[in-house]
Image (spheres, grey):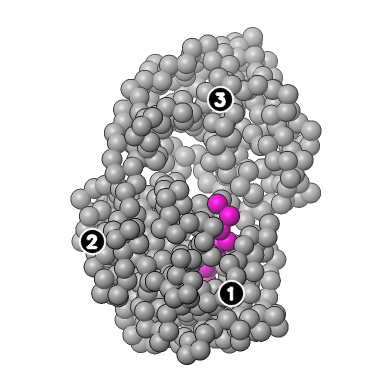
Amino acid sequence: MKFRHITILAAILVAGCSTEGQSVRPGITSSDDTLLRRWISTIGSDDFGGRKPTDEYEEKTTSYLIEEMEKLGLEPAFDGKWLQEVDMISTVVRPQDGNVSLSGVKGAADLLFPDDVTLWTDRATGRINIEECGFIFAGFGIDAPEYGWNDFEGIDVKGKVIIAMVNDPGFYDPELFNGRNMTYYGRFTYKFEQAEKMGAAGCLVIHNTEAASYGWDVVVNGHLGENLALFDKETGNAGALAFKGWLNENGFRKIAQAAGLDSDLLTQEAKKPGFKAIALDVKGDVKLDVSYKTDVSHNVAGVLPGTDLKDEAVVFSAHWDHFGTSKPDESGDSIYNGASDNGSGIAALLLLAKKFGSLPIAPRRSIVFLFPTLEESGLLGSRCYCENPAFPMEKTATCINFDCIAPAALTEDISFLGGGQSCLDFYVMASAAAQGRYAYFDDDNSDGWFYRSDHYNFVKRGVPALVMENGSHLVNPDKPNKYPQKEWYHQPSDEYHEDWDLSGTIANINVMFGAACAIANSDTLPRLTK
């Protein structure tokens, strides 16, 4: 991991970023601690039922957020409305014959569902039926001119099923792409987007635990039940891929053997520059039964209007959704409270709204406090916002995203994602320096985390973004934060506890407050530089 530390330039920016009467060095106060605890403990309580979109607790959650924003003096962000409708579709897919059977020159390939393959669709249809479908192994499924890489050169994939490896070539060769730091080309979402763009019938991504950063059980648990997507009422999502899914390595081995090929040799060749997609000598009928329903969830957002640059905006974001209820854990608890993920982010935005509302002089740019829905279902709420923003993307200075930020003990440092892509780095560094701390950006993206939260939809549209992360060098090493993240992440055990240490959380929020003050008052809009 490489670090970008505080520089003299950052200190200069501190001096030049604040307007008269505004401080970029807010201190940690007991009221900050009290408010943060109240908001986290409330939104993360059993009373909110795990905050699953579209169930009975959505209205309770969104009403609570609106009530709190009204108390803080914010205005509705969506043309006088607090809520933005997010049309969605939920589908459950099963192979009609229980499994997917293909035939090739060297025999049959019976893909067991869901042991070998998981499948879903975004289309509003009761049945998917693709007869005598052809399959193409497209390596990583990447067309990246800036890296001199095109797996699709010289092949037509229209109406075919693309099989692509997860991650990108840099994962296997540090001289390619960004090395172990995954690019967006490595995300499975890119593979699906590229396949749809090229007119493929479907796309299957080959799973590898190390390259994906999670196991096959995560894939199955995430897609065996309901699969959510944004929904176009006019088209019924008819232009979406007929199906998409994950294929584990054993499933791909079966297909390759049926085609008379060695799956290991295929994937090894795909990792080398100059690889070109290969049409596999296998065919089969893909027949799927689909049950679906459409529904509407809601983004929530308030705005603090700016002054002379009020038609431009700084956006803070923190998703409000979580998983609702599911089967009980060992303790008998079935409510996924999501106190840290993302009750802590929600509380951070409300605290920031209070701080901005308390400034003696309003910022030049407007400040948007956005609570997207459906983050846990694929960043759908923030995608909807970016397609229909309260402020145009070209007039959005940045998105500062908070996701799972508490508890955190006070550290000498603060880390953030999104650095090295714009001048935003220096605003954060300067604000940290005003606290007597140092900041660096975390450029280890080997697990693709930078692409896995709401801010990335802004980045895809050219808006610089920052994601706050907690530091690692404790001010008091004798009192480490012992909250077991691996045990509570996406589990019913993610509940608020009174013994949470929020000193680091509040200090980090204040760093981002100082940075946002400077960004909101700067003469020019930050822009991505790479």
Residue 233 is a magenta residue:
no
Mark 2 or mark 3, which is nearer the start of the sequence? 2
- The residue positioned 38% from the left and 29% from the top of the image is 235
**What x and y, as percent, mark residue 379?**
44, 49
Q: CA distance from mark 1 to mark 2?
A: 36 Å
**Mark number displayed over residue 63:** 2
- The residue positioned 33% from the left and 22% from the top of the image is 126
Q: Residues within 10 Å of mark 3 (few under 14, many from 20)?
A: many
Q: Amino acid at mark 3?
A: Ala
As helix, strand or loop, the secondary structure at mark 1 comes to: loop
Identify the image quadrant of residue 193.
top right
**What x and y, as percent, mark residue 181?**
66, 53
Magenta stretch, residue numbers: 461-473
**What x and y, as percent, mark residue 222?**
42, 41
Q: CA distance from mark 3 to mark 2?
A: 42 Å
Q: Amino acid at mark 1?
A: Asp
